[in-house]
Amino acid sequence: MTTSLNAEDLTWHPPGKWSAGEILEHLYLTYTGTIKGFSRVLESEPVRKQQSLKMTARAFIVLKLRYFPNGVEAPAFSRPKGASSTNILADIGPKIAEMDTVLATCEAKFGARAKVLDHPFLGPFSVAQWREFHLRHGLHHLKQIHRLRKLKAQ
């Protein structure tokens, strides 16, 4: 879907909404954040906090019910900062591959189900849960890009 986006597609957006380029930058930032977090885990030990009931419920909705709610504000570290959409498009695939490698390394060291790293809103996740989160999160944002393209075409 992203390979057919031109420069105008990447920058167009309705007022108050992110453009496709900004959505891709947000995803890129979440991938690099996950890489950094898991790299720290590999250097030391898993980082886990107590999971609140609210976090447990949110994680269940996203990971088990496979529903990613709209309107949740992204953490500050993952908000678009104005990076070049061309660079993001070129770098996002390799970042996904790098993230997969660090996840596989952690999985080999700690197991797929051990809680190893906290998600900022959903609490401690295992490697398997991080994989599922990124799948659901990416699909959620691909739907947004698809809607943007439809709106732009009207």
Image: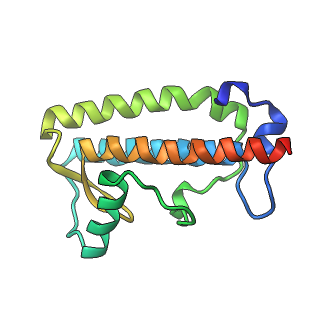
Q: Residue at x 64, y 53 (%)?
A: 80
Residue 54 occupies which quadrant of the picture?
bottom left
Q: Quadrant location of the C terminus? A: top right
Q: Position of residue 107 (x, y in %)?
A: 19, 36
Q: Foreground: 63 or 48?
A: 63
Q: Quadrant location of the N terminus? A: top right
Q: Residue at x 34, y 43 (%)?
A: 132
Q: Foreground: 25 or 122?
A: 122
Q: Residue at x 34, y 49 (%)?
A: 37
Q: Residue at x 33, y 40 (%)?
A: 131
Q: Is residue 154 left or right of residue 142?
A: right
Q: Is residue 70 left or right of residue 18?
A: left
Q: Position of residue 92 (x, y in %)?
A: 55, 32
Q: Foreground: 119 or 6?
A: 6
Q: Position of residue 72 (x, y in %)?
A: 53, 66
Q: Is residue 46 above or below residue 149?
A: below
Q: Is residue 132 left or right of residue 21?
A: left
> Looking at the image, how many numbered discs can be counted on the residues?
0
